[in-house]
Amino acid sequence: MEKELEQFRQEVERLKAGRKKGALPYPEALRAFAVRYVEHTVGTGGTMSQAAKSLGVSEPTLYAWKKGERAAHRRAKGPGPKQELVPVVVSKSAG
């Protein structure tokens, strides 16, 4: 797994160098490897933090990938669910 980990790190660095933060999601194959690596690390007594450090990505990103999301920050930055306008009745109060 060390060889694959090194290849993952190299690919992450290559991708980071050519993009703005949060611009494009990582390829599915990289995300899938990261999730397998996290499961292996945690399964052998390690932590999510250790896995993130080894992989060279943030913990929130790993949590999101593990949950099947493309990017951890997309929820915070991207538009949320459409909110509809709610009619409001305004009246004078008595008094």
Image (tube, rainbow, N blue to C red):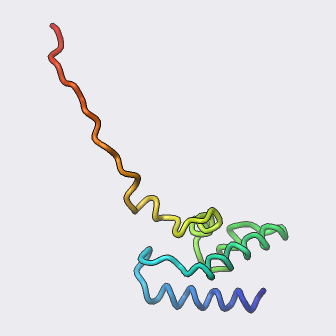
Q: Quadrant of residue 76?
A: bottom left
Given the current orientation, which residue lies at the most extreme top position? Answer: 95
> In the displayed structure, would residue 62 be above or below residue 4?
above
Horizontal side of 90 relative to 65 (left or right) equals: left
Above/below status of 35 relative to 27: above
Residue 48 x/y as whole percent: 70, 67
- Residue 38, image quadrant: bottom right
Residue at the spot x=84%, y=70% of the render? 44
- Is residue 92 rendered to the left or right of residue 82? left
Please give left or right for residue 19 compared with residue 26 in the image: left
Examine the rendered structure and indicate whether residue 80 appears above or below residue 46.
Answer: above
Residue at 65% in and 80% down: 55
Nearer the observer, 67 or 3: 67
The residue drawn where x is 71% and y is 72% is 50
- Where residue 53 appears, as percent x and y from the top left, is 65, 76
Residue 19: x percent and y percent? 42, 84
Q: How many marks?
A: 0
Camera-nearest residue between 82 and 34: 82
Which of the two residues, 70 or 13, is positioned nearer the viewer here? 70
